[in-house]
Image (cartoon, rainbow, N blue to C red):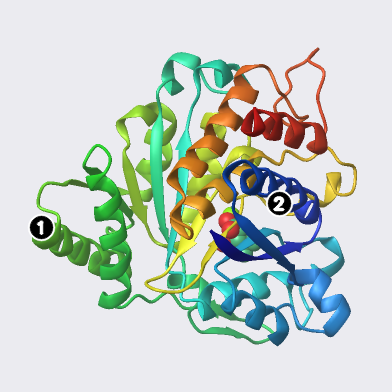
Amino acid sequence: MKAKITVLGGDGIGPEVTGEAVRVLEAVAARYAHEFEFVEALIGGAAIDSSGSPLPPRTIDACRSSDAVLLGAVGGPKWSDPSARVRPEQGLLELRRVLGLFANLRPVRTQAEMLEASPLKPEVIAGADIMVVRELTGGIYFGRKTRTAHEAEDVCSYTTTEIERVTRVAGRLAMGRRKHIVSVDKANVLETSRLWRTVVERVLAEEYPEVQLEHMLVDAAAMHLLRRPTSFDVLLTENMFGDILTDEASMLVGSLGLLPSASLGDTSVGLYEPIHGSAPDIAGRGIANPCGTILSAAMLLRHSLSLETEATAVENAVSAALAAGLRTADIAGPGTAAVGSRAAGDAVISRILS
Ligand code: IPM
Ligand code: MG
């Protein structure tokens, strides 16, 4: 098949990790006889530097006219002044909004050969397989923001429609998995959470009656994710709780650098990005772990291009490379030699081509 993929490297390690993911996609194209066209565009701090805007119109056009978007990361100390008028992160949030990407899928799966990479006990994390569904275009991220010299506010609001549509995504995913959803909220305190609970319950009862639903308060969920991670199947939650809980959940697999994500809407083009940030401390050194971005590219193949065989081939190649001992600096234990981003990409590519 032919596909046009917009690549937004962004800031820090972003271009390094998307570079490896593009090489992997090129290997997939060669191996399975597809034609992928890659179009690069600017976002975040890099875009601010060149045009003053973190999401220039040209970038939006490129994304809209492509089949899928692959993104690295945005942000960095250069643009972090709290009084700055524009911030790199605005580019990413605005892109999610204009593309209507309300459902963010963040799979977290531990692998037998990788258990020692996690700071947690192997017997606790073995077999964990969680699909986090994070609402992505609502809540406190997108509510009204005000600021005076002595006061600031960020409004958290959710509509029924926003909760319904993300619940449907979680319901559909749960049906293909273990049919269990933990919906995470703070219903003992927040009004938005009480609406969330009511809507999630209704939608699942009406449309996915086979799915077993459990509600959990976010503070308890933060604890249970570490205490009994294998008891979670699909974890459905609102925007900010999902942001926080997935950084936490990355410790089950050992590194933020390993987790991919897919951001999907009803009809629009999908956006695929690792869950990690721009890691300015290691940027430009060629040592970042590209696996989260490579696995995001696998999700791109699956969700935007319907290439399930190819997606699985990429995921299997990453697992096999990790099982064979491939370790970038973030997951290399003491005394283990670490490989760089390029070598990590090569290890995945050679397995796809063989
Ligand atoms: C993420 C990131 C973003 C978020 C930032 C960069 C705006 O942390 O994708 O998890 O908070 O959504
Ligand atoms: Mg985050």
Percent coordinates x, y for residue 120 in the rendering: 53, 22
Q: How crowded is mark 1: few (under 14 residues within 10 Å), some or many (20 or more)?
A: some
- Of helix, strand and loop, which one carries label 2? helix
- Give me the residue at 46% from left, 41% from top: 309
Mark closer to the observer (2, 1): 2
Front-lying residue, 190 or 278: 278
Q: Can residue 331 be seen in this view?
A: yes
Q: Left or right of 247: which side holds 126?
A: left
Residue 205 numbered tag? 1
Which quadrant, please, contains the C terminus? top right
Q: Residue 316 — which label?
A: none
Looking at the image, which residue is at 46% across and 76% down? 100
From the viewer's perspective, is residue 259 above or below residue 79? above
- Depth check, front residue: 24 or 132: 24
- Which badge, 2 or 1, comes first in the chain's sequence? 2
Badge 2 is on which residue? 22
